[in-house]
Image (spheres, rainbow, N blue to C red):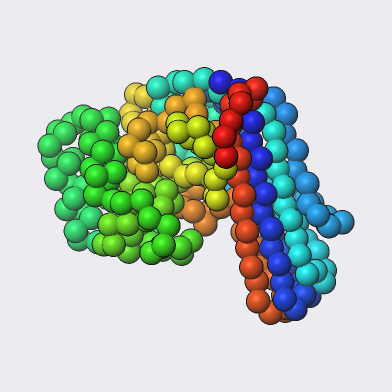
């Protein structure tokens, strides 16, 4: 599948900020199921962009600027994908899977979550992949997709208790439960071509990858109750949202900050609706 992606993030500062630093993880890399045909990143100001790879191998741009009242960061490009049954091959793995057993404040478990995961683990016996598929479906059933009650700083424990949240929350819950059951899991930020034909989205997408002995890393999209497909474009990974966020940074001075995000994901050459 050939996917056309555009992602725009706009910040406004009233009064102007005296300086900003932003870390951008908005550029996808290639692997056996994903080839980046072309990609470009643009910013609305004459800002310095330093590119490097972070500890996880994500392509990262660091943007710095002095006094500024508004900033728009835009990326767009074409990515060719094919379905690998959710299995990941051809990535640069810099750490052993065991690193991704490490809990973070966003992926810590409560007693209820640990029991939820343990019951599924016991039912699956020694079948790790079976456990992960059961976890995927149970989280999807437990949660209701709702953009109102959670935010970027909501933890897996908070979202699990609310039984509501967005794709980030579903991913954090899956990761937390998998780790509590002894299965390495990590956060993935990226994009998804929606199956309903709607190309306009108000955010990127997020899912999880879990490590299965003998298979390697496998993608699980709990928000949709499926393993990853050719409709998913993988951009960055991390222990949780904070280490894989598309844009994360800080500002100096200034007053009120507003943020707008617009994402379009479509199959290249297809007549689409928005």
How far from the left and from the top, in percent, is residue 77?
69, 33
Which is nearer the eye, 199 or 156?
Answer: 199
Residue 186 x, y percent position in the rendering = 43, 44
140 to the left or right of 256: left
What quarter of the picture does the N terminus occupy?
top right
Quadrant where the C terminus is found in the figure: top right
Which residue is at a point 49% across and 53% down the rendered structure image?
Answer: 241
Q: Is residue 108 above or below residue 40?
A: below
Q: Is residue 211 visible?
A: no
Q: Nearer the viewer, residue 140 or 132?
A: 140
Drawn side of residue 3 relative to residue 117, left or right: right
Q: Is residue 256 left or right of residue 105?
A: right
Q: Is residue 66 visible?
A: yes
Residue at left 23%, top 55%?
Answer: 113
Residue sitting at 19 percent across and 58 percent down?
A: 112
> In which quadrant of the rendered view does residue 254 lie?
bottom right
Q: Is residue 188 above or below residue 78?
A: below
Asked if residue 132 lies left or right of residue 12, the reply is left
Query: Eyeballing the image, is 51 above or below 215?
Result: below
- The residue nearer to you, when weighing 114 against 138, is 138
What is the x, y in percent for residue 207? 43, 42
Residue nearest the observer in this picture, 42 or 108: 42
| Residue 16 image point, x, y percent | 77, 75
């Amino acid at each position: 599948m050939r996917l056309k992606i555009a992602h725009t993030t706009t910040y406004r500062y009233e009064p102007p900020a005296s300086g900003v630093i932003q870390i951008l993880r908005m550029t996808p890399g290639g692997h056996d199921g994903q080839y980046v045909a072309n990609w470009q990143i643009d910013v609305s100001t004459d800002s310095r962009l330093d590119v490097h790879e972070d500890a996880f191998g994500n392509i990262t741009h660091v943007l710095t600027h002095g006094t500024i009242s508004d900033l728009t960061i835009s990326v767009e490009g074409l990515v060719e994908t094919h379905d690998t049954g959710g299995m990941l091959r051809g990535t640069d793995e810099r750490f052993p899977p065991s690193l991704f057993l490490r809990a973070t404040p966003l992926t810590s478990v409560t007693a209820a979550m640990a029991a939820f995961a343990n019951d599924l683990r016991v039912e699956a016996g020694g079948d790790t992949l079976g456990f992960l598929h059961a976890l995927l479906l149970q989280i999807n059933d437990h949660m209701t997709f709702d953009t109102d009650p959670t935010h970027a700083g909501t933890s897996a424990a908070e979202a699990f208790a609310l039984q509501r949240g967005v794709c980030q929350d579903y991913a954090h819950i899956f990761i937390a439960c998998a780790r509590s059951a002894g299965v390495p899991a990590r956060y993935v930020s990226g994009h998804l071509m929606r199956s309903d034909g709607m190309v306009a989205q108000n955010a990127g997408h997020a899912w999880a990858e879990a490590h299965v002995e003998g298979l390697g890393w496998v993608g699980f999209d709990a928000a949709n109750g499926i393993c990853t497909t050719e409709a998913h474009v993988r951009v960055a990974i991390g222990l949780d949202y904070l280490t894989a966020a598309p844009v994360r940074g800080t500002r100096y001075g200034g007053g009120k900050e507003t943020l707008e995000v617009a994402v379009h994901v479509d199959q290249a050459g297809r007549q689409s609706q928005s």
